[in-house]
Amino acid sequence: MIAMLNLAGLVLASIFAAAIAAACNWLLLKVTFRLMQPAAVRKSTTQTHLARHSVQLTRAIAANR
């Protein structure tokens, strides 16, 4: 009888640990996607910023020749 109670306790603890691990995995995945989102938005503005300055640099060099 005691062995069956120990086995039942082990099974319940394993199920609880698996549920906690799944919840932590889901939470970390959600945080990762939330942290990646601003980087994707910032990338397009940086390229526009670089393109604008390269055009200004080209005009400045062309004016000096």
Image (cartoon, rainbow, N blue to C red):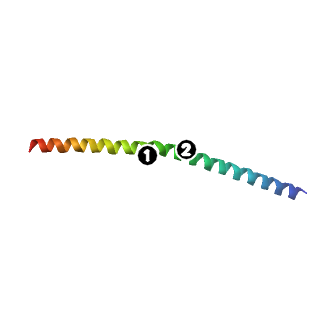
Kind of residue at badge 2: Val
Mark 2 Cα-neighbour bin, 10 Å: few <14, some 14–19, many ≥20: few
Q: Is residue 20 left or right of residue 41?
A: right
Instruction: List the residue tagged with mark 1.
Output: 40
Tell me which residue sits at (86%, 54%) in the image: 5
- Marks 2, 1: nearer the viewer: 1
Q: Can you say which quadrant of the picture contains the C terminus?
A: top left
* Mark carried by residue 14: none
- SS class, disc 1: helix
Q: Please provide percent x and percent y for residue 44.
A: 38, 45
Q: Nearer the viewer, residue 59 or 25?
A: 59
Residue placed under numbered mark 2 in the picture: 31
Which residue is rendered at x = 61% and y = 48% of the image?
Answer: 26
- Which residue is at the front of the view, 57 or 20? 57
Q: Residue furthest left?
A: 65
Nearer-the-camera pick, 14 or 41: 41
Q: Residues within 10 Å of mark 1 (few under 14, many from 20)?
A: few
At label 1, the amino acid type is: Ala
Q: Residue at x 55, y 44 (%)?
A: 31
Q: Where does the image place residue 22, in percent across and percent down from the top left?
A: 66, 51
